[in-house]
Each structure stands twice: as C-alpha cells, then as structure tokens.
Amino acid sequence: MPRRAALSSLRCALAALLLLPGMTAAPQGARTFPGVIALSVDLTDIQRRIFRVVETIPVGPGRFELYYPQWLPGNHAPRGPIEQLAGLRFRAGGQELPWQRDPLNVYKFALDLPSGTRQLQVEFQVATPQTEAQGRIVVTPNLLGLQWNQVLLYPAGYRARDIRVQAALQLPPGWKYASALRADPQFVNAGADRVTFLSEPLEHLIDSPLFAGRYFQQFDLAQSEGPPVALNVFAEEPADLAASEAELTLHRAMLREAYAALGPARFDHYDFLVALSDQIGGVGTEHHRSSENSLPPGYFRSWEEDADGRDQLPHELTHSWNGKYRRPARL
C-alpha cells in the first residue's frame, strides 16, 4: 500500500477507535440531568451473595438510553462487571416495558417510554462472584465491599458530574458500614439497618465505595490541624480488631508525613476502608476521600512480623493528591 494511503487508513482506524461506544468525549454543551435519581440497594442476601437494586429515574416520554458503568476509577481497562448483571426489568406507571441492548455496545440499553411517563423504575440484581474463578469475591459471611458502579444504570448524554444520585442501603441486621458518603439527617429514623445518604454527583458516588460488616471498629487518625480522618476496620473475627496505641500512633504519623510531603489535605474528610480477611478478594484502590484495602486478618496481631506489608495504606492515601486531586485533563 502506498505510504499516503497507509497513513490515511491509519487515521481512519484511529478515528473509528475514538468514536467507539463508551469511548466518546463528554457531551458538547453539557447540561444537568433534571431531577435526582433514587438508588436503593438491598445487601441482606449474604448467603447467596446477591445485591438487589431498585432505581427510580425522573424522566419524560420518548426514547431513553442508559449505560451500565464501563470506565471505572482505579481500573486499568474498560471492564465494568456487567457479566454480574441479572434480572433487568423496566417499569413506568406500573407497566413493564420492553427494552433493547445496543448491538455494538453491551453496556448500553434503550427503551421507548409511553406518553405521560414521569419516572422510570429499574430493577435488577447483581450476582457477585461465588468463587475466585468468577471474579473478585466481595461478600463473605461477615463483611462485604460495595462499589456503586456495580449497582446502577445512568442516563446517556450527560456528564457524570451533572447527574445527581441519592443512594440508600438496607444492611444485614446488626451490620455497620463505613464510606466517604455521609448520611442524610432527614432519614435518621428509617431504622437501624437502613441508611440514606446525601445526594451526590454520580462522579462522586462512584468514587465513594462502601464497606460493611458484622465486626467493625473505627479509629480516629485526624491531626490537630486538618480534616477528619478515620481508619474503618472490618474483620472476620472480632479479635482481629484490637489495635495497640503504638500501632495507631504509627498510622497517625502516616498522615503527618503525607501532609509534609504532599501539602495540605485536598479532601474535606478521609476514610480508610479496611477489610481484615483472607476470604474476600484482594483490593487496593485509591479514591479522593477514601481507599479500599484488603489486608491479612493478623494485620494488628502480627504487627512485628509483617513490617514489609504495611505500604498499602500510605500508597492509596498518596493517590488522593496524585491521581485524584491532580489528574490528567478529561480523565
């Protein structure tokens, strides 16, 4: 092939890649999605490791398209776990509606909403992995990790920062949770195992995962000058939650060193989410106001023997500055 023709073909191929579904740039003349999406997630089916989702989206009649999240924070490829999506149903005005999956992009769904529609109800389940061969295990008998991208569909044509979502959880009886999200005080009387969070832009929601569990301990790491910082620890056994004052002093020193090296905190609060478990799948993922961390059950018990395994918390904390506060344009 002549060089000029080859270059032309290469340009066309690159342009086609840039226009693939799910890889498009933010909408031109971006606008705010009208209304707030209500997202309710039931986490009580621990035995079968199933998350149950009901989502209510304010929307009018006509053609409506949605995405399941594909491009995720802290991931190195467009690999949202859509294979775990099950039982998808759409309803408007009490009527179940037919829907279509995009033939070129399995993450995209479309349906026609009838006249008079004011809101769309979306129901589905997330069948989380039962074995490591199916993916990272996120639920054990005593704790779980929830990434919000697993449990929502969002309207196409809007930037993530321009869509607001109010999330709510039904926890297993007696379980506690921790997240960078904050509870909405208007719903404090909804029950001990029910929590409704303040509405957040979708961008912030996706970047604010949640851990929950039967055995939980929170440790204050805040400095005299600086925002609140909490070490939220979940374990398979309550004995694994015991931390000495000397160990906590070192964790607090980690914050002082981070501020000295990287400058003032760029977050208004920060939550380390830590699972001390050899049953849950390994995770170490950075977020702006939190981090997801799985560590050995003996993290505190075997402190002196495992000095070379203590770098995960400071590593993920560093990314709050480098990669979250400071990040490439359009990331």
Image (cartoon, helix red, strand yellow):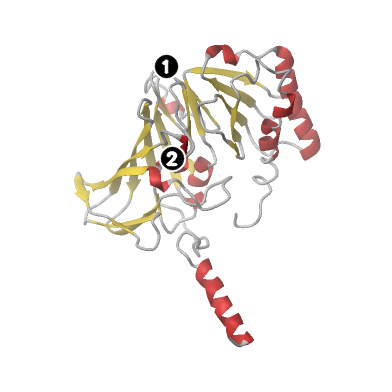
Report which residue position mark 1 lands on: 174
231 up-or-down from 67: above or below: above
Element class at badge 2:
helix
Q: Residue at x 64, y 21 (%)?
A: 299
Q: Is residue 220 left or right of residue 236?
A: right
Q: Quadrant of the N terminus?
A: bottom right
The residue closer to the viewer here, 296 or 132, is 132
Residue 303 in view in this figure? yes
Residue at the limit of the structure toward the left, as seen here: 95
Q: Residue at x 32, y 52 (%)?
A: 59
- Of circles 1 and 2, the one toward us is 2
Dot 2 amino acid type: Gln
Q: Quadrant of the C terminus?
A: bottom right
Q: Residue at x 48, y 25 (%)?
A: 212
Image coordinates for residue 9, horizontal then vertical, percent: 55, 80
The residue closer to the viewer here, 104 or 42, is 104
Dot 1 amino acid type: Gly
In the picture, the disc for residue 288 is none
Q: Residue at x 51, y 19 (%)?
A: 236
Q: Are marks 1 and 2 in contact (CB under 8 Å)?
A: no
Q: Determine crowd level at label 2: few under 14, some 14-19, many 20+ residues with C-alpha closer than 10 A.
A: few
Image coordinates for residue 11, horizontal then vertical, percent: 57, 77
Quarter occupied by residue 196: top left
